Image: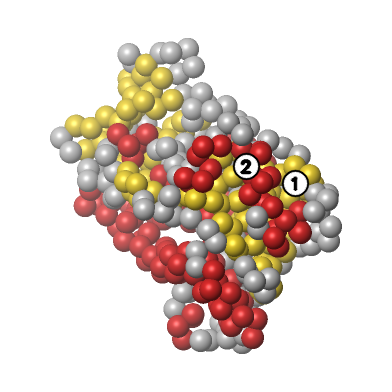
Amino acid sequence: MTARATDVIVVGAGPAGAATAILLAEHGLAVQLLDRARFPRPKVCGEYLSPEAPRVLDRLGVLKRVDGLATPLAGMRITAPDGTVVIGTYRAVGDWRPYREHAMAIERALLDEALVERVRALPIDFREQVRVSDVLVEHGQVVGVEAVDRAGRVERLLAPLVIGADGRASVVAQRLGLRRGSRFKRMALVTYVSGLDGWSDYGEVFVDPPDYAIINPIAADRGNLSMVVPLAHAAPWSGRLEAFLTARAKHLPHLARRLAGARMVAPVSAMGPLAYEVDAPRVGGVLLVGDATGFFDPFTGEGIYAALRGAELAVETAVRALRKGDCSRQALAAYDRARRLAFGGKARVTRALQFVITRRGLANLTARVLALRPGLLDVLLGVVGDFVPPRALLTGRVR
């Protein structure tokens, strides 16, 4: 076993990890970025970027490339269980303006590739096919990680700060005993469809409790179809996911009509259980970013923006701590406070939306109210799109 030292070890090179590594490197820090995969690699994802995500992508130096790969989404078309359709657009609401007045749909492999190319252009020690197997803790402080390369060699990699950006199955969070389950037991099934009639520049949502489905047009005649169902319903079909998804879609009448004549053009992938919670680290020398911090539900599509914005917040704290030479738990606590301020309000809105969309009568009533007040739907879409503060839903500021 050999030892190496650096300023920061970032575990995971998805959007959260790549963004973190890029921003740290731009501050002049020595960064080691590790990922167990070799890029490009497949990733189950709804492939949605909120209107505020381009701001961070611009800061990272990849927005121009992403613009050439993504499909703009002017808004969302939502179909309630009773067939009521409401359409919201991403637009300025009062004094709140989005960075872009549209969201974007993009294949995850293309987004990851754009970020990884930027990583490779910087003085970052990026190591693919390296699996982190353990977190090294001494005297209440994380001091590095144990990693295994593709040849099976074990290394102790040392740094005063480790940032876990290794997603849902975060080894960093698990080894530190931070991950907890959730009472929301759901599974996402994801595939691509082609041949849809009336292709538009709107994302489409179909709510039909206990399920919902989302179609994002990621390219000409190609859409990402994601269906979220109770885990208990899908688990017995783990070996026949395509058959389950096909049959399940027929039980959502409005979705079934939308998919009439369409065809699946990719295998069905599954991810679940979707929701889980992660506690704040109880030791120093470590931060968590992106899905490693926990996940609730993909209805609002917050995953990638939260990863990118979380990277900004983590880097702000990390740079201050490293420059002071203090990566104690107390010195890093500012990050958790910043995360609560940035994401706490939207998390409450997300939970409220889950309460609505899992109850047929309430979902229908809400859709009818929003149909009468389209401006309110635009406010809600602004909150979901990360540029309108959640308090706007209470103040009723609609223009």
Residue at image point 44% right, 78% down? 391
Residue at image point 27% right, 46% down? 281
Residue 241 in sight here: yes
Which amino acid type is shown beneath numbered disc 2? Phe
Which amino acid type is shown beneath numbered disc 1? Val
Image quarter for residue 189? top right
For numbered disc 2, what is the local secondary structure? helix
Q: Nearer the viewer, residue 49 or 225?
A: 225
Residue at image point 75% right, 46% down? 193
Residue 315 in sight here: no
Q: Is residue 131 left or right of residue 248?
A: left
Disc nearest the viewer among 1 and 2: 2
Q: Position of residue 126 (x, y in %)?
A: 51, 30
Q: Is residue 257 left or right of residue 291?
A: right
Location of mark 1 (residue): 193
Q: Nearer the viewer, residue 199 or 307?
A: 199
Classify 10 Å Cα crowding around label 1: few (below 14), some (14-19), many (20 and above): many
Q: Position of residue 346 (x, y in %)?
A: 45, 67
For numbered disc 1, what is the local secondary structure? strand
Quarter of the figure with the C terminus: bottom right
Location of mark 2 (residue): 244
- Tell me the tag on residue 367: none
- 38 to 343, vertically: above or below: above
- 178 to 144, vertically: above or below: below
Classify 10 Å Cα crowding around label 2: few (below 14), some (14-19), many (20 and above): some
Residue at image point 67% right, 74% down? 84
- 192 to 366, vertically: above or below: above
Q: Position of residue 104 (x, y in %)?
A: 67, 57
User: Which mark is first along the chain, 2 or 1?
Assistant: 1
Q: Is residue 250 left or right of residue 308?
A: right
Marks 1 and 2, Cα distance to the nearest angstrom? 16 Å
